[in-house]
Amino acid sequence: MLFKSLQQLVDDPDRGPGRIFAWFIQVVIVISIFDFTIETMPSISPELRSALWAFEVISIAIFTLEFLLRICFSKKGVRYAFTFFGLIDILAILPFYLALGIDLRGIRAFRLLRLFRLFKLARYSTAIRRYHIAFRNAREELLLFGATALIIIYIAAVGIHYFEGKVQPELFDSVPKCLWWATTTLTTVGYGDAYPVTVGGKLFTFTILAVGLAAVAVPSGIMANALSQAREELEKENAPKS
Amino acid sequence: MLFKSLQQLVDDPDRGPGRIFAWFIQVVIVISIFDFTIETMPSISPELRSALWAFEVISIAIFTLEFLLRICFSKKGVRYAFTFFGLIDILAILPFYLALGIDLRGIRAFRLLRLFRLFKLARYSTAIRRYHIAFRNAREELLLFGATALIIIYIAAVGIHYFEGKVQPELFDSVPKCLWWATTTLTTVGYGDAYPVTVGGKLFTFTILAVGLAAVAVPSGIMANALSQAREELEKENAPKS
Amino acid sequence: MLFKSLQQLVDDPDRGPGRIFAWFIQVVIVISIFDFTIETMPSISPELRSALWAFEVISIAIFTLEFLLRICFSKKGVRYAFTFFGLIDILAILPFYLALGIDLRGIRAFRLLRLFRLFKLARYSTAIRRYHIAFRNAREELLLFGATALIIIYIAAVGIHYFEGKVQPELFDSVPKCLWWATTTLTTVGYGDAYPVTVGGKLFTFTILAVGLAAVAVPSGIMANALSQAREELEKENAPKS
Amino acid sequence: MLFKSLQQLVDDPDRGPGRIFAWFIQVVIVISIFDFTIETMPSISPELRSALWAFEVISIAIFTLEFLLRICFSKKGVRYAFTFFGLIDILAILPFYLALGIDLRGIRAFRLLRLFRLFKLARYSTAIRRYHIAFRNAREELLLFGATALIIIYIAAVGIHYFEGKVQPELFDSVPKCLWWATTTLTTVGYGDAYPVTVGGKLFTFTILAVGLAAVAVPSGIMANALSQAREELEKENAPKS
């Protein structure tokens, strides 16, 4: 009886106690991410830092308990640990336990591993499934036009290198540097840290924007279309067969 | 007879005197908003300031009269005061009367409450109804992909914090600061107050733009689709049933 | 005989000599615009300036001759001068003749009237007709959502005035100044001449971008849809009735 | 026998050894482009520069061999050299051989001719065929609305010249200079190197953005639609006729 209700807890996030459990875990994940975000601020008081650390310990305890519950009561049993979501669960708690043994605090990249708990949210998201279907359907097209967009960015970089390389060597003296300009220009971000100053460079920018803006925007449109098709597919799947 | 025509005045903005009344109120709202806009300029002459204040008093008088007319002659009677538009009418005049009793001029936020009269325009707008239907139909999708967009912005912020945190601590030394960069970059605003300078940061920006631009643009597309579907729904509703 | 062929010249730009005449006039317009563009550069040599002036005189002569031909041989006769294109033809040559009598060169705005000859191109453009149909069909929607976009830009300006007015008075100390920031931000131009620096202002910017980007983009989408519908309408009109 | 299999090698990139050959050539092209990109960096060590030069020689050898194979074993024979792809193959290797004879290293433009080998990738790309069909179908519309976009950019430039020419002569004192501002503004890149500072200039920018953003975005939308129609056309072509 208890076994069955615990199984429902971890296996059925859509109804009854499983629903409450799912909400609880999601809230803990979000607070935990918020905790991590605040902790990166250098100016916080030692008291707040202690409080954040205390919540970190508590949330790790909750995630560990959740992971053990899933192993014990999931239909998949121990094999759960090797599923996609099982691995995410492990990655979400492992850094904490490793850091207890060895002093890894100095390594900044290590701290960022805490971000993995963000992916625990994926379990509850139906958006993931739609992105998955959309990617699968449009993979070929995304590759095709993504490659075209990359080649246009590359040509833009070589072109601006030719026109601006001598005049602004600190910004355009090599193609890799120019790729930065090409990326921020063709996505229309335009920070203003790098821009052409010669007449030739400005004319080239005009030309490449006229040709390239559409090409760089195409993959976004393909993805948007694929996502709306994915909805239709999912609705067909879920519709009652009668 | 007078009662009926006054009722038409406040209840039927599409025909006869009600139409003129509606236009008159809208013009007063727009001038009143314009008045408020000019008043925020610090360099205006005392004469102009007096004139603006005079118009403010007149417009409040008109809005109060309008509110009393609506209570007296609307089909809903006194209950009108507690409807959505009744509350907006109260919020549009209340700050003025409160400021007469107590000296609240020093409080800047209080002055901004005058903006509430902008929402009085909503009564006459058919766009509101379409936005309402569009939101209702696409709520689930907007939440789904809005959350995805937020998560991508968050990941962008954590990533740039890792790459640029040490080199540009004044801009990227905490994740909350980096969220500002992530927002202005992924919406392609790109003010240029914060941008990566390390090779790693630039490569990361390129990657997150390639992945994230489409995801951040998806909610806009969903809203646009929902608005055009809302038109069809409204046209069906209004079509004669024959 | 001569009369008839001259009538064809001005009235039938799709066939025979009328086609050549149309092309010739278009070329003169484009060169004349190019002439005007170069003339605004302060560093050009006196020789080039003389040559540009010579071409200006020649092009005015051609436009005057064209106008007289249209009056004499057009089916509409003298009434042609009061049609839309007739008025554009007059506006394209009038400034030149006025400037001969009075010395108006000092007035900069006057020089810009030469831009009117650009609109002479409209006669030959089928795009104009499509824009016209698209505007007529979507006028109501464009007004509706254009107004919504304006209101969102206005609310953005008032909000940023509240958050940044005290800290950056030179940029945000009045709502009209803030409207500039709101325009460049919500269109994602983002020059970087004005941006929030307070935490409140940045949070507000994030919120207004999340809400407003879609709303500001909607009129563009409506116009694009209306243009593609206009094509279908025009194709139906031109299709042979069988 | 050997002849036939060599013919398959160069003529059938979809199956068997031809497939491997196609992949091999593509990898060499990509590495060769990467090589060129790295070589433009001024700070690389002489050892790396030698290695890059060595690979350049090897890749030219491979491209030359490929070209000779295609001439010998392609169905078209020697005429292959005068096809579109034959000319690209020649352009990809010619600069190298020319540079052996004469010392052309000093001419920067000459070095950029190496970029031509990028177009060798076109042979293997199905995207090219779709862009070709899309351009053919939408050519007339692209010209129509591309011209409209250009005219709006031009009007924006003349307008801003009028408003800002006196105040910021270094940026706006001639229409050609203003065209740079108009391009970066209406594409929403907004570097921030040029922006209006007068009230008139800002109001004009607001107006031209309200009118022009949609017009400049229209050609992108047309291209995107044409590309998705091109897919349907290609699918119909490739579908089995039964």
Image (cartoon, coloured by chain):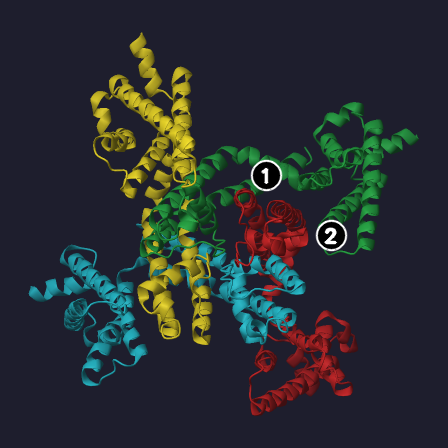
Chain colours: A yellow, B green, C red, D cyan
Q: Residue at x 84, y 33 (%)?
A: B8
Please report whichever mark, 2 or 1, sits nearer to the chain's N-terminal start. Answer: 2
User: Gap between marks 2 and 1, in whole Å?
Assistant: 37 Å
Q: Which label sits on residue B230?
A: 1
| Residue C118 image point, x, y percent | 63, 74
- Left-right relation of A191 to D91: right
Q: Nearer the viewer, residue D195 or D58?
A: D195
Tell me which amino acid carries mark 1.
Ala
**Residue A53, quarter of picture:** top left
**Residue at the image position 31 percent from the left and 78 percent from the top:** D108
In this orientation, does residue B235 appear? no
Q: Callout 1: helix, strand or loop?
A: helix
- Mark 2 secondary-structure assignment: helix
Q: Residues within 10 Å of mark 2 (few under 14, many from 20)?
A: some
- Left or right? Give the position of A158 relative to B145: left
Rendered view: A106 above or below C241:
above
In x, y percent, where is residue C170? 62, 56
State the count of labels: 2
Q: Is residue A102 left or right of residue D176?
A: left
**Residue lying at 69% horizontally and 35% vertically, measured from the top left:** B240
- Which chain hosts label 2? B
Residue B50 numbered mark, or none: none
In the rendered image, which residue does mark 2 sit on? B38
Quarter of the image containing the C terminus of chain C? bottom right
Q: Amino acid at mark 2?
A: Ile
Quarter of the view holding residue C81: bottom right
